[in-house]
Amino acid sequence: MGYLDKFRLDGKVAIITGSSRGIGNAVAKGLCEAGASVVYTATTLESAERAAKKGAEETGAKTIGLKCCVEDTEDVKKLFADTVSAMGTVDIVFNNAGIANIADDLINLDPADIRHHVDVNVNGVIYCCQEAARIMVAKGSGSIINMCSMSAHIYNVPQKATYYAATKGAVLSFTRSLACELAPKGVRVNCISPGYHMTEMAKQWTECHPIWLERIPMGRFADPYELSGTVIYLASEASSYVTGAEIVVDGGYTLY
């Protein structure tokens, strides 16, 4: 096997949460192209199945769409059980699902909004990692990739997102701890911290774009598809000695 072959994901089964649109959808396409069978998820079955069908048509990969609200433990358990039933196992999990609302000053935040972000961005990742670990530890192999953010390291401007930054800091810490726990059992755990990718969500915040752009050394926003290479690397044997790592993909934003 040549070294480039180590990046291939043939025969592997991947779950990507929140993959009906945005980064999750773009990365799902990349994993399909790398040879993986991919489970697309969304908060509605219709959206998940539509995305999975499109992914299969574009790449020829085996795909299925399943409903999953990651903050719901029963949904998460069903997602993994249904994946094993349909695909046989789970080799790769990309915990991409998350939410980010531009908020007010800290003193004006709605406690319900804070709880919702923690439930999705933090608890949802933990629930999915728990179910993934049950399967991966039993067979002694697997790769878990968590979606973090450069917001775990910086103060976002001009938008106020203190609660969002807190959730991503939690994901970073959790990833490192879980990597240590699962490494002796053959399971790798890493995370990715993107900068500004032009997803449907980011496109809504047009008033922020000029301020974001002037802080990016590369002078442009990223296409969501550009994150595929990083996920493929962490999912594949090419990163066989990498665990507990954070890869920042931000065009240099956090260098300032």
Image (cartoon, rainbow, N blue to C red):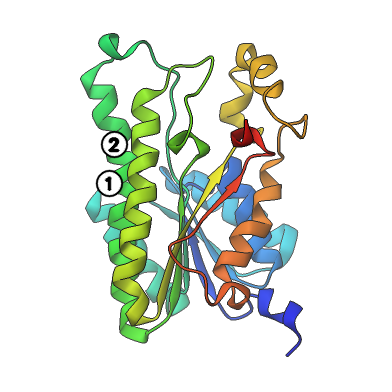
Type of amino acid at the residue the image marks with label 1 = Asn
Relative to residue 171, is residue 105 depicted above or below?
Answer: above
Mark on residue 172? Answer: none
Q: On the rendered structure, is 174 left or right of 60?
A: left
Q: Quadrant of residue 163?
A: top left
Type of amino acid at the residue the image marks with label 2 = Val
Q: Nearer the viewer, residue 87 or 236?
A: 236
Q: Which quadrant: the N terminus?
A: bottom right
Visible in this render: residue 58? yes
Please, which residue is most extreme toward the front here?
Answer: 256
Q: Could you say where residue 90 lies in the image, as x and y percent from the top left?
A: 43, 73
Q: Could you say where residue 220 lies in the image, as x and y percent from the top left?
A: 76, 31
Please, which residue is most extreme toward the bottom here?
Answer: 1
Q: CA distance from mark 2 to mark 1?
A: 6 Å
Q: Residue at x 43, y 17 (%)?
A: 160
Task: Check whether the beta carbons of the residues at disc 2 and disc 1 lie within 8 A of each other.
Answer: yes
**Residue underneath mark 2:** 118
Q: On the rendered structure, is 67 left or right of 6?
A: left
Q: Which quadrant: the C terminus?
A: top right
Disc 2, SS: helix
Mark 2 and mark 1 lie on one chain; the one further toward the N terminus is 2
**Residue underneath mark 1:** 123
Q: Residue at x 56, y 28 (%)?
A: 201
Relative to residue 118, is residue 127 depicted above or below?
Answer: below
